[in-house]
Image (cartoon, rainbow, N blue to C red):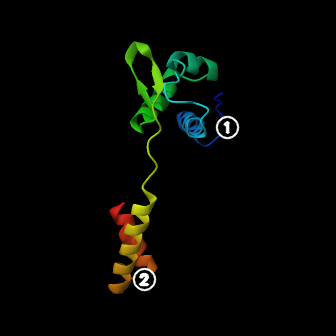
Amino acid sequence: MLSVAPESATPAYEQIVTQVIGAIREGALAAGARLPTVRQLAGDLGLATNTVARAYRELEARGFVVTNGRKGTVVSAPPAEPLTDEIDAAATLFVKSAQRSGLDLAAALGVIRSAW
């Protein structure tokens, strides 16, 4: 199910993360599905175990999987999508405030970049 393009500029662990997240969001990997062991996936893909372990750590940090020691790594419920209505409202409020303050678009984007 997973593959890695060694010639890609994207690191192998990021390719794994992207593919697993895609499979979860598309429903191909359901909550509770068990992922292959780090060693097994590394062997299947011809990668170092540390590369696959890094991908699994990233997936866990983002909330897509849970690692339970000897029970392995399983898919968790996908994290909630951002609250787009709340983000839209905050963006509108920011734009109006920036305009009242006399900021142009470039300056407003600069404020966002520095806050990011």
Quadrant of the rendered structure where residue 8 is?
top right
Quadrant of the rendered structure where residue 72 is?
top left
What secondary structure is marked by label 2? loop
Question: Which residue, given by chain and number where applicable, does mark 1 sit on?
Answer: 7
Q: Which of 6 and 27 is in front in this view?
A: 27
Going by the numbered disc 1, the residue's amino acid type is Glu
Question: Which residue, given by chain and number where applicable, does mark 2 sit on?
Answer: 104
Q: Nearer the viewer, residue 17 or 80?
A: 80
Q: Where is residue 98 in the image (x, y as percent from the top left)?
A: 36, 79
Q: Residue furthest top?
A: 70
**81 to the left or right of 90:** right
**79 to the left or right of 98:** right
Q: Where is residue 103 in the image (x, y as percent from the top left)?
A: 38, 83
**Circle 2 or circle 1, nearest the eye:** 2
Mark 2 crowdedness (10 Å alpha carbons): few <14, some 14-19, many ≥20: few
For the N terminus, the quadrant is: top right
For the C terminus, the quadrant is: bottom left
Going by the numbered disc 2, the residue's amino acid type is Asp
Q: Measured along the vertical axis of the image, is residue 36 above or below residue 94?
A: above
User: Mark 2 or mark 1, which has the lower sequence index?
Assistant: 1
Mark 1 crowdedness (10 Å alpha carbons): few <14, some 14-19, many ≥20: few
Q: Measured along the vertical axis of the image, is residue 42 above or below residue 56?
A: above
Residues under labels 2 and 1: Cα distance? 42 Å
What secondary structure is marked by label 1? loop
The reply to whether the C-beta atoms of the residues labelled 2 and 1 are less than 8 Å apart is: no
**What residue sits 46% from the left and 49% below the top?**
81
